[in-house]
Image (cartoon, rainbow, N blue to C red):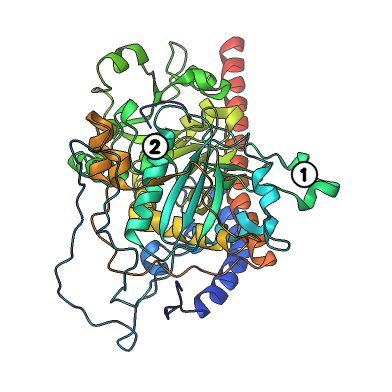
Amino acid sequence: MEEESSHGCCGTKTWRPLKTWASATVFILFTVVLLSGVFLSWIDIPTFTFPGASIFKPTANERSAQPSPKTESPKTESLKTEFPLKCNATVKRTCPLDYPLKHETKNLYAEVCPEYFRWIHEDLRPWKAAGITREMLESIKSTAHFRIVVHKGKVYLDKFRPAYQTREEFTFWGIVQLLRMYPGKLPDLELMFQCEDRPAIKKQDYQGSKATKIPPLFHYCGHHTAFDIPFPDWSFWGWPEVNIKPWERTLSAIKEKAAMMPWKDREPYAYWKGNPTTSPSRADLLKCNDTEKIDWKARLYDQDWGREMAEGFKHSNLEDQCTHRYNIYIEGIAWSVSQKYVLACDAMTLLIKPEYYDIFSRGLIPMEHYWPIRPHNKCRDIKLAVEWGNKHPTQAQSIGEKGTRFVAESVRMKYVYDYMFHLLSEYARLLKFETKVPPGAVELCSEMMACPFDGSIRKFMEESMEMSPGDSLPCSLPPPYEPHELKAFLKGKEEVTRRVETWEARHWKNFKKRSSSWWSRIFHH
């Protein structure tokens, strides 16, 4: 992702309401049937009442089943032992020996993970049958930036080549914090990781006899033409080069600032600010700024990178950009870390149809969490969405609030760590070789990583550091989609998007006819 400013477990018994997932299948199938009737009336009426969207899946609170009195652990009041950063002034690169390698959690209740966790099973499906061999892993050493090894509760780094800016440092940091949160709970494993923008393992390169030799490569995003395994991106722990603070702090700041400006008092336009040079689609987006001939209802800004870099991005605080009723998300070179920040603003997100996906974006539902925008009809679709929203503020504000609730509840850091935990645990089960620490690999720990740094890097690491083991278990991983269930889910989302696009196309066709008729009357008179 380019720089921009818009930018149960471990043998423990857990409680999981299995009937929820059987019911979910019925819900999804019912939704697909219902949507057709909903949209037939919806298209013909000048308001978007959309009761069908919300039944695609429950909200985070509804999805997380509540414990019954019999299964809920008694609440205990106890002081947690914290393990702050210990930087020795003379010997910086050392790992302390006092942090526990195991931790028994007193609260044995595990809530059910958000539904997007089910994609973990789909992302690992290529290796379910035959597993992962060392040969597969070693075959992509030249493509990966580094190897991560988890062995006996510790994590080691085998670095091959440097990545862009501090992507790798904050990715390492996130993995180290995962082990601090759940010490001793991750199985031994080895993985390869690549930090570029676009996925690297193309499906077209692994057909025929090579279909059983697909190399597993972890990445920040995925694509339908690639096998790369999506993993939480570095910005969850901070991006110092562009002054993006750790996710929890940023989310809190955005929510606080957004609450200061009621939705009705915000600018009634669509907003975007970022780097338009990273993709043709972004360059094309700038054409949607208002002109003397037409106001496309968009306010779009080209980030002044020279000025911002010189001034440390002081004018690019994400929380200062929640001033409009509508925010635009558009990809750059590939997926963009800005998606979670755009959604967090409590504005209705206008999501220009993406090609790539990260860990959570496949859980977003059109017309529930965002308004879909066609890539080749950006200006018209943006204008129509804004004008509709200004005429129907209650519905538009509701979409914005649901999008914000999704990232605030379902993508909070506890779930980010839980996603990592389950992804790595499921991955480790597929390994057909014995894990070993390569010669020259370096043990990673908070002190070894943070102490050599100062400035924003050190500050962001300290702010995002897990000070002690977690009080609760990882959430309970839901089962894989049944093939028919996944098909119905995807078909339902496509149906919603397609009907919105049909409505948009019909609107502009009628608009053109009305305009032609108007000009004809002017000409004849």
Local crowd size for mark 2, using a 10 Å CA cut-off: few (<14), some (14–19), many (≥20)? some
Which of disc 2 and disc 1 is earlier in sequence?
2
Q: Which mark is residue 346?
A: none
Residue drawn 28% across and 22% down? Answer: 313
What secondary structure is marked by label 2?
Answer: helix
Query: Which is more toward the observer, 417 or 26?
Result: 417
| Residue 408 image position (x, y, % from top left) | 33, 52
Q: Is residue 385 above or below residue 18?
A: above
Query: Which residue matches tag 2?
Result: 169
Type of the residue with mark 1? Tyr
Q: Residue visible at 31% across and 30% down?
A: 240
In this image, 168 relative to 497: left or right? left
Element class at badge 1: loop
Q: Nearer the viewer, mark 1 or mark 2?
A: 2
Of all residues shown, which one is farthest toward the right? 208
Which one is nearer the viewer's eye here, 119 or 446?
446
Report if the CB atoms under discs 1 and 2 are less than 8 Å apart: no
Q: Is residue 519 left or right of residue 3?
A: right
The single residue placed furthest to the bottom in the displayed view is 70
Picture residue at 27% right of the left edge, 48% below the top: 465
> Can residue 403 be seen here?
no
Above or below — where is 439 with respect to 379? Answer: below
The amino acid beneath tag 2 is: Glu
What is the crowding at mark 1: few (fewer than 14 residues within 10 Å), some, or many (at least 20)?
some
Question: Which residue, given by chain and number where applicable, does mark 1 sit on?
Answer: 206
Mark pair 1, 2: CA separation:
31 Å
Q: Position of residue 38 (x, y in %)?
A: 56, 58
Residue 439 drawn at (x, y percent)? 52, 44
Do we see residue 150 in this rendering?
A: yes
